[in-house]
Image (cartoon, helix red, strand yellow):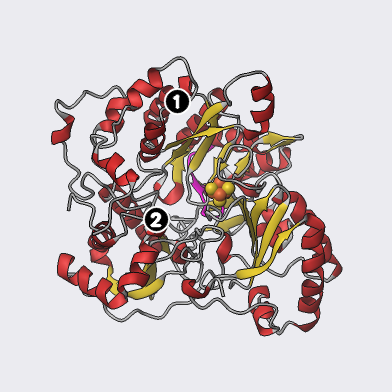
Amino acid sequence: MDKPNNSQEPSSVEILKENSNYLRGTIKESLSDPLTGSIRTDDQILIKFHGTYQQQDRDLDEERKRQKLEPLYSFLIRVRVPGGVTTAQQWLAMDELSDKYADKTLKLTTRQAFQFHGVLKRNLKTTIKEINQSLLDTIAACGDVNRNVMSSANPFESPVHGEVAEDAKRISAHLTPQTNAYHEIWLDGKLIEGGEKEEEPLYGKHYLPRKFKIAMAIPPRNDTDVLSNDLGFIAIVENGKLLGYNLTVGGGMAYTFGNNATYPRVADVAGYFPKEKIVEAAEAVLVFQRDHGNRSERKNARLKYTIDRVGLDFFRSELERTHGLKLEPSKAYKFVTLGDKYGWIKSEDGLWHYGVFVEGGKLVDKNGYLAKTAIREIAKIHSGTFILTGNQNVVVAQVTEQQKPVVEKILKDYKIVDGNSLSQLRQNSIACAALPLCALAFAEAERYLPSLVDRIDKILAANDLLQVPISIRMTGCPNGCGRPFLAEIAFVGRAPGRYNLYLGASFTGDRLNKLYKEMLSEDEIIAALTPILEDFAKNRTTDEHFGDFVIRKEYIKATTAGLNFHN
Ligand code: SF4
């Protein structure tokens, strides 16, 4: 298993992984080089496995060039939070680190993680060390390994939600890389003599062909977008008891402009298994991808392409051969929404939970709206937990009856917007980070979507559609970090101020959208959407979703599989 499995030449990244001494490379030397704020090219790939990316502030590129300075390099750090649950102490620690070493914002990602932006190289090690001191970590938050395992937004909602969240944690722990490199480099852990003797029992020297994402979902809420993941588990619940899971395989969002061999894909529901086998099932699918994924062409290396290449029957037979896991026919389930719950809800155990809307997942004090401070003030008095949701929001969870008025007062004092008071479009919006720090971004996303939604809200208001749930997402490139291809209205950046518009995804995350128009400016976007939304207001059937309507009225053809996304 320690060899790339293709007959073709392995990609340069495969060779780099093999020669990296289990992800050590020359990261230590790169970090201690005082002459530059960047790190060596090979190490830029390896540090992803440690949960950090090198970036540069593109807003400042011109000015720095004029001053004959190198670009302003900095680092993104992604903090792994399995199932998205943190304690109040951990929240305070992350809040403080974002002020001390990052750009004073806490980015809540679409995979229930914290992200720090703008950390300078000289602070990178200290920041990662302090993250670990708060009992969170960054290992495997990025790279060709299993990423943060997502779970439904509130594990405290019912005993089943709790059980599923525990399963997410068990999977996460089981699939975490074992290399001691992380401890050596970031935590001053002892060097393993002759590090090459160290083993990665599951991954081997080459780890996986590409990133690997897992999510759990509990119907009727698909708040983790489970079918966008390489591997997903849909809880099957009967009479309030968790029986097992439907296993879903081969989801993924990214594609490359101009390369139709790449495409987003909605996962297949491969079959059902009883809950006791959850960790074994996760391992079996990871091993399948490790051994059958494409190690030559990284653009076709995700599990979604492996499944389309080898077929579901072979996939099922391999799970049985390698792990004795025989999938049964999948069980019936129904999703009704992808969205989060805002405001107060009470769980079966009598505790309260408040869902806070965080636009674009960016928690920051800005223009007099002190959202970050408000959550910090809550954390100072909160005996419960916080949950990061897959929709970039946060839930103040496990609030006691006594504490509820105190939390309410803080929310009121800081005028925190009740998500329920916003248009349903804004409530169901997601944006990736994009410019200025993401090197791959062609256009704005997080900084721009709110103002675009202001304009679309006006069309909705004029047509009495403000309270009709419609999902909208924007990313700065087609890499898919904000899962744009599962939004009913999606924008993907092509160039500064220009976007591709995609329509026709379902509201429940089981059908992709399709390209409707290319390279639109803001005015062209408004001009394109206005007549369709007017038509929708007049001619939709009862409870018909926008994504279904545009297909019925033939604005766009339905995408029935990843393979027909482009036609
Ligand atoms: Fe960057 Fe593209 Fe991901 Fe957005 S989708 S964060 S632009 S890589």
Q: Is residue 231 above or below residue 106?
A: below
The residue depicted at 45 percent of the width and 62 percent of the height is 252
Residue highlighted by disc 1: 124
Q: Is residue 94 above or below residue 550?
A: above
Q: Do the residues labelled 2 and 1 touch (CB within 8 Å)?
A: no
Q: Any magenta on residue 391?
A: yes
Q: In which quarter of the image is the C terminus?
A: bottom right
Q: Where is residue 20 in the image (x, y as percent from the top left)?
A: 27, 35
Q: Any magenta on residue 422?
A: no
Q: Give the range drawn in magenta.
A: 382-397
Residue 392 in view in this figure = no
Q: What element carries label 1?
A: helix
Label 2 sits on what residue type?
Answer: Lys
Label 1 sits on what residue type?
Answer: Leu
Q: Which of 33 and 130 is in front in this view?
A: 33
Residue highlighted by disc 2: 213
Which image quadrant is residue 519 in?
bottom right
Q: Position of residue 260 (x, y in %)?
A: 50, 66
